């Protein structure tokens, strides 16, 4: 049986090679003036960069004040956001009073707040903040509440349940 042309031209690991003229020969340094890389071996004349073992730090500009030090400092990053310390979604007493008429049986629960779109479905915990701004009697079921908000709700005749 003869081999077909398609099997001879197929690629596999044994017959891969770089395309012609894609790999240049390495520079052979210091082999006489006629080579084009003699005498200083392509390093120019004297100086720190011509010596062996030369290495510069990133951003080093030869002693000139580097760019990252010439530019002004801008902004800052809050460590609270980096640490992720705020685990509560915060709601104000004003928002609670606005939606209190629509609450079933006058009870504002987590499910009711999710249904109104005030908190996301993925929200772990809810906290109510505020000192004043509520005059209606409401019952609230949340994970946390500030002392000012609790006293304002209880002064209006409402109740607070901590989950």
Image (tube, rainbow, N blue to C red):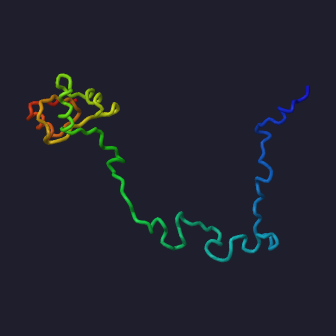
User: Is 121 left or right of 63, judged from the image as shown?
Assistant: left
- Assign the C terminus to one quadrant of the image: top left
Q: Nearer the viewer, residue 33 or 75?
A: 75
Quick check: 115 above or below 41?
Answer: above
User: Is 64 left or right of 2, judged from the image as shown?
Assistant: left
Quick check: 49 above or below 91?
Answer: below
Q: Quadrant of residue 91?
A: top left
User: Is 17 left or right of 52, judged from the image as shown?
Assistant: right
- Assign the N terminus to one quadrant of the image: top right
In the image, farthest residue toward the right: 1
Q: Position of residue 65 (x, y in %)?
A: 48, 72
- Point 8% across, 35% down: residue: 155
Q: Nearer the viewer, residue 141 or 156?
A: 156
- Point 53% across, 70% down: residue: 61
Q: Quadrant of residue 129?
A: top left
Q: Position of residue 25 (x, y in %)?
A: 78, 58
In the image, farthest residue toward the bottom: 46
């Amino acid at each position: 049986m003869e081999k077909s042309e398609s099997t001879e031209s197929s690629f596999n690991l044994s017959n891969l090679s770089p395309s012609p003229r894609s790999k240049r020969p390495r520079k052979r340094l210091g082999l006489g003036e006629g080579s084009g890389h003699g005498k200083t071996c392509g390093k120019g004349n004297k100086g720190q960069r011509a010596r062996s073992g030369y290495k510069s730090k990133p951003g080093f500009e030869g002693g000139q004040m580097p760019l990252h030090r010439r530019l002004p400092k801008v902004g800052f990053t809050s460590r609270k956001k980096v640490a992720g310390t705020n685990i509560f979604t915060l709601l104000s007493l004003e928002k609670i009073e606005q939606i209190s008429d629509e609450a079933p049986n006058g009870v504002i629960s987590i499910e009711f707040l999710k249904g109104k779109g005030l908190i996301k479905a993925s929200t772990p915990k809810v906290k109510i903040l505020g000192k004043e701004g509520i005059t209606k009697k409401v019952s609230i079921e949340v994970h946390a509440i500030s002392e000012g908000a609790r006293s304002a709700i209880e002064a209006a005749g409402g109740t607070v349940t901590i989950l």
